[in-house]
Image: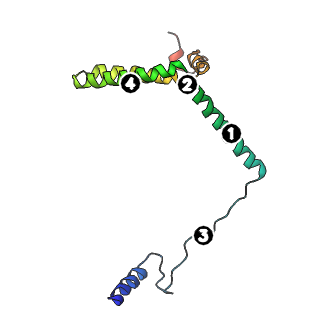
Amino acid sequence: MQSHQSAKFVLAFTHSPFHSQETGTMTKLMTKRTYTRRTEDDRIRELEARLEEVKARLEERKRMDTPLLREWTKARKVLRAFQQTATESGRSDLALSAEAFAAGLERSIHTNPEEQARRRSKPAKNDSDPWNERP
């Protein structure tokens, strides 16, 4: 029994794509890795970036405690229940409208008011854009 298993291994070994038929040995296909040691400045920059991420996450957590966001979670649950009821009643159009409304509110709630003001501002007129041309 032992010789049968070892014969399977030898057969599998010799038909491996890494096995060289000429020498009867395994060839090494992996190349040696090269490592670049980070400088102190690189490590400081990485740590500063991580610190900024943590600060942003902390600010987001502080914002999540506002009464507006607490009420939004309640309203979202009610809207989801409405969507489910509308779907079950065969009114997928109302369910889709409620879903779109919820998505718009979700996006508005999770953006800063300053970002929203920048989005609403009129873009600079581009003369090469045919949509901005007047007839």
* Label 1 Cα neighbours within 10 Å, binned few <14 / some 14-19 / many ≥20: few
Give the alpha-carbon distance from disc 3 to disc 1, as whole Å: 36 Å
* Above or below, 29 relative to 14: above
Instruction: Between label 2 and label 1, give the one nearer the viewer.
Output: 2
Instruction: Between label 3 and label 1, give the one nearer the viewer.
Output: 1
Give the alpha-carbon distance from disc 1 to disc 4, as whole Å: 34 Å
* Label 4 Cα neighbours within 10 Å, binned few <14 / some 14-19 / many ≥20: few
Circle on res. 77? 4
The first of marks 2 and 4 along the sequence is: 2
Image position, residue 26 (x, y; %): 51, 80
Asked if one can make out residue 130 in the rendered structure from this viewpoint, the answer is no
| Residue at the disc numbered 3 | 31
Give the left or right position of residue 119, taking residue 92 as reference. Answer: right
Give the left or right position of residue 91, taking residue 108 as reference. Answer: left
Q: Amino acid at mark 1?
A: Leu
Q: Amino acid at mark 3?
A: Thr
The first of marks 3 and 2 along the sequence is: 3
- Which type of secondary structure does the marked residue at label 4 adopt? helix
- Which type of secondary structure does the marked residue at label 1 adopt? helix
Q: Is the C-beta separation of discs 2 and 4 under 8 Å?
A: no
Q: Amino acid at mark 4?
A: Lys
| Residue at the disc numbered 2 | 65
Give the quadrant of residue 76.
top left
Image position, residue 54 (x, y; %): 64, 37
Give the alpha-carbon distance from disc 2 to disc 1, as whole Å: 22 Å
